[in-house]
Image (cartoon, helix red, strand yellow):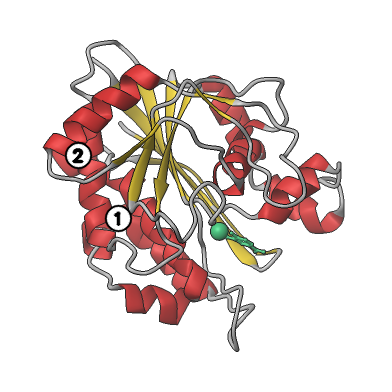
Amino acid sequence: MARITASVYTSHVPAIGAALDQGKTGEPYWQKVFSGYEFSKAWLRENTPDVIFLVYNDHATAFSLEMIPTFAIGCATEFKPADEGWGPRPVPVVQGHPELAAHIAQSVIQDDFDLTIVNRMDVDHGLTVPLSLMCGQPQAWPCPVIPFAVNVVQYPAPSGRRCFNLGRAIRKAVESYDAPLKVQVWGTGGMSHQLQGPRAGLINRAFDNAFLDRLIADPAGLSQMPHIDYVREAGSEGIELVMWLIARGAMSDEFDNKAPKVAHRFYHVPASNTAVGHLILENQ
Ligand code: DHB
Ligand code: FE
């Protein structure tokens, strides 16, 4: 049977993609950001899964205000990098895993979560920047990726509690897939940031670090936090953090009580307008 081996959590920032694509990673400003991912790139080379289930948000790129799926699972064979206004990023096309994606859709929808099936979709910085941070600049991404888009752009966004329970349903789905695949679940977006309005530029280090602590040690409790607390403490775009609870809900300790191993933890301010947080948790 397939199994979930680890979860990875990381912020996404379009300027990080631009820094990589334009060869600026050695500049002092960016060097500090990328230093937090040196361990992670080596770790991923050592621990390459068969499939990455990548939870992210689309930023009104593939979707628009015309159609707003709360949860959308990418079932296509491939996903092209999106043009977000400056041309597509010069990164590899994402290869999907249609069989596992269809199996997860079947299992999770029968488990009462409403997913939108997506058979064609371009993927924006929400998906490609985490891949770049973890993989560098390869000719091809190291394994197939199932994109899983969550609406955190237009209210109502799903609650942290629903995201956490969805993660549990995804674990059940993966573990009922009849092939010995190693699967990682990645939760992306966040940490504190606000891109508009009078509080634009907001960063909250205390909140972010407490979020990381609780994500590791008390995810079920953390999942009860209401939206208003994310927005008040972490800024309007801090709501992206609910996506991390999907990856956390898919970890084994929710079922066998064995705490995951914290393989890596990193926090840095600033990257563009965002606090960058990053965690790697391994199932024991
Ligand atoms: C920034 C952060 C985001 O999450 C995003 O989607 C766009 C921009 C930023 O920090 O500039
Ligand atoms: Fe974002």
Number of other residues with Cα within 10 Å of mark 1, as a class: few under 14, some 14 to 19, many 20 or more: few
Determine contact: label 2, label 1, CB under 8 Å: no
The quadrant in which the C terminus is found is top left
Q: Residue at x 47, y 23 (%)?
A: 96
Label 1 belongs to which residue? 217
Q: Quadrant of ligand 1?
A: bottom right
**On the image, which quarter does residue 207 sit in?**
bottom left
Q: Is residue 22 left or right of residue 95?
A: right
Q: Position of residue 44 (x, y in %)?
A: 55, 28
Question: 149 or 20, which is in the foreground?
Answer: 149
Is label 2's Cβ within 8 Å of ligand 2? no
Q: Residue at x 27, y 63 (%)?
A: 159
Number of other residues with Cα within 10 Å of mark 2, as a class: few under 14, some 14 to 19, many 20 or more: many
- Looking at the image, residue 135 lies above or below residue 257: above
Label 2 belongs to which residue? 169
Q: Is residue 190 left or right of residue 89?
A: left
What's the distance in space between the residues labelled 2 and 1, CA to CA?
20 Å
Q: Residue at x 72, y 39 (%)?
A: 89
Is label 1's Cβ within 8 Å of ligand 1? no
Badge 1 element:
helix
Label located before the other in sequence (2 or 1): 2
